[in-house]
Image: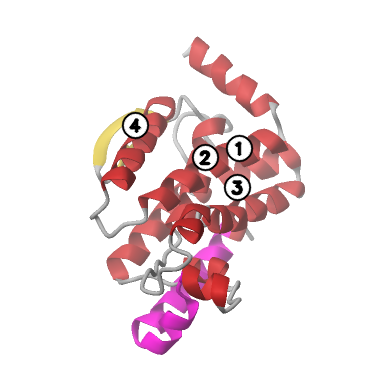
């Protein structure tokens, strides 16, 4: 069984529980003030398993499924989704790498908000977006010539072009603010996904540029 499916089931179950139980949802939210001053470190992870509403939940889970385990067109290996590709390349260690990628994405995507809002008791965030971005950008690193079409950009374009476009958009939206979305978490999660897989196997970065050059 793929870890992606386990994450989908657990996240959906916990999120649905939170939809009808605000006290439960509040207890799991990422609140930097409580993390720092009340030592509620668990919030740095649990926030990724709850969501604001069905739209928020379904969007994140769709992206996780799409790039985690959904079969991609374009060949039996080159465009495999992330988790099966990791298993093909590294055997059972692929499970470990995917798990560390996702859990690390949850943790590292919070770092900017943790420092920036450490004394702001009113700041809260929730959702798996940071970890999902780690999965998406690890996929981009390993499949740069695959085409990607997203809801907000429905025209299929190569992953190595779509990736930078997403990063630029997230950076400027984070600087502008006012969207009610943790764009800094998206940006950091994406960078973490690239860095983590490069640390796991630096050849992936070399192959990334090689594939772009030959595309």
Q: Position of residue 66 (x, y in %)?
A: 44, 49
In the rendered image, is residue 157 in sight? yes
Q: Are marks 1 and 2 in contact (CB under 8 Å)?
A: yes
**In magenta stretch: residue 180:** no
Q: Kindly state the secondary structure of the residue where label 1 is placed.
A: helix
CA distance for labels 1 and 3: 17 Å
Region rendered in magenta = 4-31
Query: Taking 27 as reference, is 53 left or right?
Result: left
Total number of numbered labels?
4
CA distance for labels 2 and 3: 18 Å
Main SS, magenta residues: helix
Q: Earlier in the sequence, mark 1 or mark 4?
A: 4
Q: Quadrant of residue 16?
A: bottom left
CA distance for labels 4 and 3: 24 Å
CA distance for labels 4 and 2: 13 Å
Q: Coloring scheme of the render?
A: secondary structure
Q: Which residue is mark 4?
A: 165
Q: Which residue is pictured at 48% across the width and 52% down the height? A: 112
Q: Which residue is mark 3?
A: 83
């Amino acid at each position: 069984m793929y870890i992606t499916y386990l994450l989908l089931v657990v996240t959906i179950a916990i999120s649905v529980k939170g939809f009808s139980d605000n006290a439960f949802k509040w207890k799991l939210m990422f609140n930097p003030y409580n993390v720092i001053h009340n030592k509620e470190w668990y919030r740095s992870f649990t926030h990724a398993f709850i969501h604001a509403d069905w739209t928020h939940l379904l969007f994140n889970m769709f992206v996780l499924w799409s790039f985690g385990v959904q079969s991609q067109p374009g060949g039996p290996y080159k465009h495999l989704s992330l988790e099966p590709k990791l298993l093909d390349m590294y055997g059972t260690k692929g499970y470990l790498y995917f798990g560390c990628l996702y859990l690390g994405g949850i943790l590292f995507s919070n770092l900017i908000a943790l420092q920036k809002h450490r004394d702001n008791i009113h700041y809260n965030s929730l959702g798996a977006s940071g970890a999902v971005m780690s999965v998406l950008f690890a996929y981009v690193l390993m499949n740069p010539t695959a085409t990607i079409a997203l809801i907000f950009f429905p025209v299929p374009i190569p992953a190595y072009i779509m990736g930078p476009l997403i990063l630029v958009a997230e950076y400027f939206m984070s600087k502008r603010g006012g969207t009610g979305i943790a764009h800094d978490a998206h940006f950091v999660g994406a960078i973490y996904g690239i860095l983590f897989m490069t640390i796991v196997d630096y050849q992936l970065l070399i192959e990334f540029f090689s594939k772009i050059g030959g595309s």
